[in-house]
């Protein structure tokens, strides 16, 4: 972002660069063109380690460098679409207003819980610089949230409750296969080619391949089809885990009938020492040997053709 800060580039040029980069990022991740930039750069339920060029441009243009230059009221040329001085004034106004309001407790924590906020009047030069940049970043993230709420399909995650946020790091981007990562992102923002989306995009009339429901949605395919539910397809992975647990428990149950084997360790006595009488240690078992155990597993063998 250093060239954007030193060069007199208008915000419209940064927006064009951002649009070109966004198209390449979607192609790299295997995402459709209809996916909003909120899903790429917003702090949502699924957070990607990406930052837009426009946000970096705003951060660098609003970051004060030298106090003498800052006091000279030098205008930063950013074009007519976005003004750096106006953005800084709004960020400083928000910080001063937060200082007037005082410390407000957010969340379910008790009063005084958490780190005390930094106020504008008590901050030094370096802290004020960080607070202004953080305020500009927060305002841009608010724009992403407003855009997500206004979207019916891709912003449906804003109505979810009890969902744990997931942060994807750069190491995860390189480790996760592209097809799996693309499916994860597109399933969160409802951009998978399900029959309902295909009907909206191309006007195709498609039905569910199992229950013949017209224009089935992603929710119907993943957890709402009655035919698939009756066939046990939804619980297939869960049954596979239970089957492995049942195999291990059955081996332990059969081995429980054998008498326990005592491990007698050879004890070495040094010259002039006395040998201590130690009891042999018994091997730990999962089931108590004085009871009879029966194995019952509620698993059915399903021959499904996926």
Image (spheres, grey):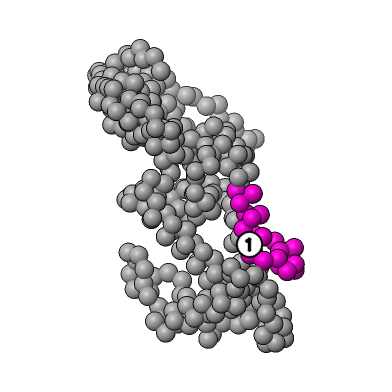
Q: Is residue 252 above or below residue 57?
A: above
Whether residue 248 is visible = no
Residue in the image at 38% along x and 45% along y = 153
Residue in the image at 29% along x and 16% along y = 300
* Element carrying mark 1: helix
Find residue 70 and report its horizontal and vertical position in percent. Answer: 68, 83
Residue in the image at 42% along x and 54% along y = 148
> Left of 149 or right of it: where is 7?
right
Q: Within the magenta stretch, is there residue 99?
A: no
What residue range appears in magenta?
Answer: 1-22
Residue at which label 1 appears? 12
Find residue 116 and report its horizontal and vertical position in percent. Answer: 46, 75
Whether residue 263 is visible = yes
The quadrant in which the C terminus is found is top left
> Left of 255 or right of it: where is 10?
right
Task: Identify the main secondary structure in magenta.
Answer: helix
Task: Give the quarter of the image for residue 17.
Answer: bottom right
Find residue 4 and report its horizontal and vertical position in percent. Answer: 71, 64
């Amino acid at each position: 972002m250093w060239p954007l800060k030193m060069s007199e580039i208008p915000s419209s040029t940064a927006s064009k660069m951002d649009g070109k980069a966004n198209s390449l990022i979607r192609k790299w991740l295997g995402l459709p063109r209809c996916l909003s930039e909120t899903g790429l750069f917003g702090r949502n339920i699924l957070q990607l380690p990406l930052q837009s060029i426009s946000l970096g441009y705003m951060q660098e243009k609003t970051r004060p460098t030298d106090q003498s230059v800052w006091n000279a009221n030098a205008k930063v040329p950013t074009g007519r679409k976005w003004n750096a001085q106006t953005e800084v004034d709004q960020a400083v106004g928000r910080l001063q207003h937060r200082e007037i309001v005082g410390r407000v407790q957010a969340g379910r924590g008790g009063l005084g819980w958490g780190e005390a906020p930094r106020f504008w009047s008590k901050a030094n030069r370096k802290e004020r610089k960080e607070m202004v940049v953080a305020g500009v970043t927060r305002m841009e993230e608010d724009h992403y949230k407003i855009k997500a709420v206004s979207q019916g399909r891709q912003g449906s995650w804003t109505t979810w409750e009890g969902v744990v946020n997931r942060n994807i790091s750069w190491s995860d981007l390189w480790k996760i296969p592209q097809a799996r990562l693309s499916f994860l992102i597109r399933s969160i923002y409802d951009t998978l080619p399900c029959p309902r989306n295909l009907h909206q995009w191309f006007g195709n009339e498609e039905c569910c391949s199992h229950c013949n429901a017209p224009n089935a949605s992603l929710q119907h395919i993943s957890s709402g089809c009655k035919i698939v539910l009756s066939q046990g397809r939804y619980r297939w992975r869960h049954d596979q885990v239970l089957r492995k647990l049942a195999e291990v428990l059955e081996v332990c149950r059969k081995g429980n009938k054998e008498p326990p084997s005592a491990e007698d360790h050879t004890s070495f006595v040094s010259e002039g020492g006395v040998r201590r009488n130690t009891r042999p240690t018994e091997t730990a078992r999962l089931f108590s040997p004085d009871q009879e155990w029966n194995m019952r597993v509620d698993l059915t063998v399903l021959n499904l053709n996926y």
